[in-house]
Amino acid sequence: MPFVTGEFEVAMKPESMSDVAAASGIGRMSLDKHYRGPLQAEGKGEMLAYMDRALGSGVYVAIERVTGALDGRSGSFLLHHTGVMTRGSPGLTVAVAPDSGSEQLAGLSGSLHIRIEGGKHYYDFEYAL
């Protein structure tokens, strides 16, 4: 499988919740990402999250549409994120949603791993077309 790595920037903005969700302590954020390197793209999405700060445990889910070029192939695809933190120990899975690729990225599958080093965000993306 091809493997690419690069840097990205992310901006998150709090968004309003339904009354039912807000009463449960769940939060909602919009995602605005800019990928550089072999993945030249923008990511736009939504995240739902809950965190118990006293215990250091929480969970988040997100869906992100990535639009741009991957290794010179243009199109878009969806990433689905599932993050779980158990008493400070993080776990994260980010994968391409099945059959979400368009144009030259039709049939894309794979997993994206996020690293944060020195305050910068990096991606490692293993994929197949």
Image (tube, rainbow, N blue to C red):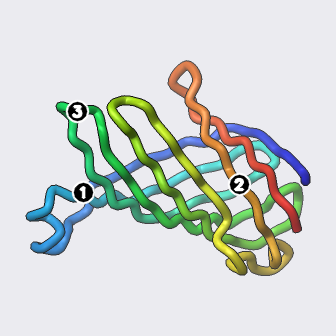
Classify mark 3: helix, strand or loop. loop
Q: Position of residue 20 (x, y in %)?
A: 12, 73
Question: Who is closer to the viewer here, 70 or 57?
Answer: 57
CB atoms of marks 3 and 1 within 8 Å: no
Q: Is residue 31 left or right of residue 109?
A: left
Where does label 3 land, which residue? 55
CB atoms of marks 3 and 2 within 8 Å: no
Q: Residues within 10 Å of mark 1 (few under 14, many from 20)?
A: some
Classify mark 2: helix, strand or loop. strand
Where does label 2 land, which residue? 111
Rendered residue at 14%/62% (across/down): 24
Q: Amino acid at mark 3?
A: Leu
- First in residue order: circle 3 vs circle 2: 3
The residue mark sitting in front, 1 or 2, is: 2
Rendered residue at 43%/31% (across/down): 89
Question: Who is closer to the viewer here, 127 or 5?
Answer: 127
Classify mark 1: helix, strand or loop. strand
Q: Amino acid at mark 2?
A: Ser
Q: Position of residue 8 (x, y in %)?
A: 61, 42
Q: Residues within 10 Å of mark 2 (few under 14, many from 20)?
A: some
